[in-house]
Image (cartoon, coloured by chain):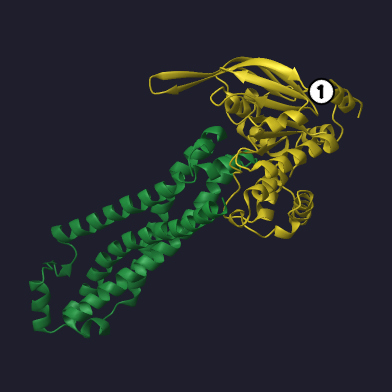
Amino acid sequence: MVKISFNSIRVRFFRSLITTLTLALAVAFVSFTWSGYELLNAFFPHADGTVQAGILAGGYELENGRFGAGAKDQWLVILSLLVCVVGIVNAQLMAVTERFREIGTFKCLGALDSFVVRIFVLESIYQGLFGGFVGGLAGVLIATGSFLFRAGWICLACWPPGSMLLTVAGTTLLAVVLSLLGAIYPALVAAKMQPAIALRNEE
Amino acid sequence: MRSETLGRDIMNPDLSHNVVRLSEVTKVFKMGNNVVEALKGVNFSIKAGEYISIMGPSGSGKSTLFNMIGALDKPSTGRVFIDEVDVAQLDAYELAWLRCRKIGYIFQTFNLIQVMTAIENVTLPMIFAGMSRDEYMEKGMVLLRLVGLAERCHHKPSELSGGQQQRVAVARALANDPAIILADEPTGNLDLSTGEEIIALLKQLSTERKVTIISATHDIKMLNVSDRVVWIRDGRIDRVEERDKLKISIGQVA
């Protein structure tokens, strides 16, 4: 008995970590795509000819003198957003659905529906903030690293701190909103359930 | 206002009134194309301070009946009255209030919150009831002392044995001095001697605090302490046995 319950708490710890990690990864992809274009736009005009030629040969397309505006690039951004939405919403849906029984217990002890929903809203905000920030940062770092490798030190010299910060902030916000979206729906369903039905769920 | 009058009822129970009354309660579960009638018209009343055991084979509707009495599920037809208030008439807020203060629940699977310590589990219903931190911490420790787990108050459920977890659950059920304690197979996951400990604890609460104890069980040990035993078969009350008439009369005098 002790062993089983001990395992269940360990599972919960890793579970929460996995949810946050999923969030971070999904956001990292978006952040990588966005910050890549930002960085490219910032240093491209200052780079010398061979570097410019190398980047154009690498598949990046200039559209009206800017990167990231072409049809292919737009698709890439949309695709990364889609992966982010599906990934985060799914991760939160699963994480909350697993805890129906806990919600049933809360309700037996006299918790209001709003209390149950509030707990999950708070949890998903924390996870969204943490996962989104880590993921956003990772995306920016990876984008910087990859262009450092391609174009050399020029991209560091022209590194745009303002727009990079904006990218991290934007992706963090995205993660929070999406993780809320994914958590609120099952939490609402569970809170409205009769406690007996919520308690019947396997943990 | 209302909480005060109910609070007085708990302190000084009127032994003649019905704490729980079921009238023609049925419950139908739809599972795909199958319709399962779990309860087929149950009429029963339970008086304040009684120790009731609901016995029956598995699948007899015991747990469903338990859920109806505890306002954890809605009957398909019929009415459930708790303190002569029709549960179906209550809104979500009043239901939460009822579950919080009027009824204490004990489950076969303990249902403690795994990520909280013993004291946090016990104080949770008091937080829902709006007590101050000092109040609920003090009362939480009193309750843990009552079940003999004061020194383990900062242990998580995973660090406690099954019997200890169930004792934490008993302490939690007592948090807001409920008039009714509902126990769904409280000894089902415990070994013989720990099961007996829990039964003794429940009996002690019933005699000392005049709490109404209703427990669904198929543990024969429960019979010895019950005032009345209700046998359920196929969703109906088969028979009601008054185990010990003497015990009931003593209970009423006291």
Q: What amino acid is found at the position of numbered circle 1 in the picture?
A: Asp
Quadrant location of residue B240?
top right
Q: Residue at x 84, y 30 (%)?
A: B13
Chain letter, colour green in render: A
Question: In the displayed structure, would residue B151 be above or below residue B216?
Answer: below
Left or right, residue B59 beside residue A142: right
Residue B218 horizontal/vertical position (percent):
63, 29
Q: Residue at x 22, y 86 (%)?
A: A153
Question: In the displayed structure, would residue B38 be above or below residue A39?
Answer: above
Left or right, residue A105 beside residue B141: left
The residue lying toward the viewer, choosing from A177 and B95, is B95
Q: Which residue is mark 1?
A: B244
Residue A88 horizontal/vertical position (percent):
36, 53
Give the residue furthest to the front: B192
The residue lying toward the viewer, choosing from A139 and B161, is B161
What colour has chain B?
yellow
Q: Secondary structure at mark 1?
A: loop
The residue lying toward the viewer, choosing from B114 and A5, is A5
Chain on which label 1 sits = B
Left or right, residue B65 beside residue B150: left
Left or right, residue B50 beside residue A125: right
The residue lying toward the viewer, choosing from B87 and A121, is B87
- Around disc 1, counting alpha carbons within 10 Å, would you say few (fewer than 14), some (14 to 19), or many (20 or more)? some
Q: Quadrant of the N terminus of chain B?
A: top right
Q: Residue at x 44, y 51 (%)?
A: A180
Count of number-bearing discs: 1
Quadrant location of residue A110?
top right
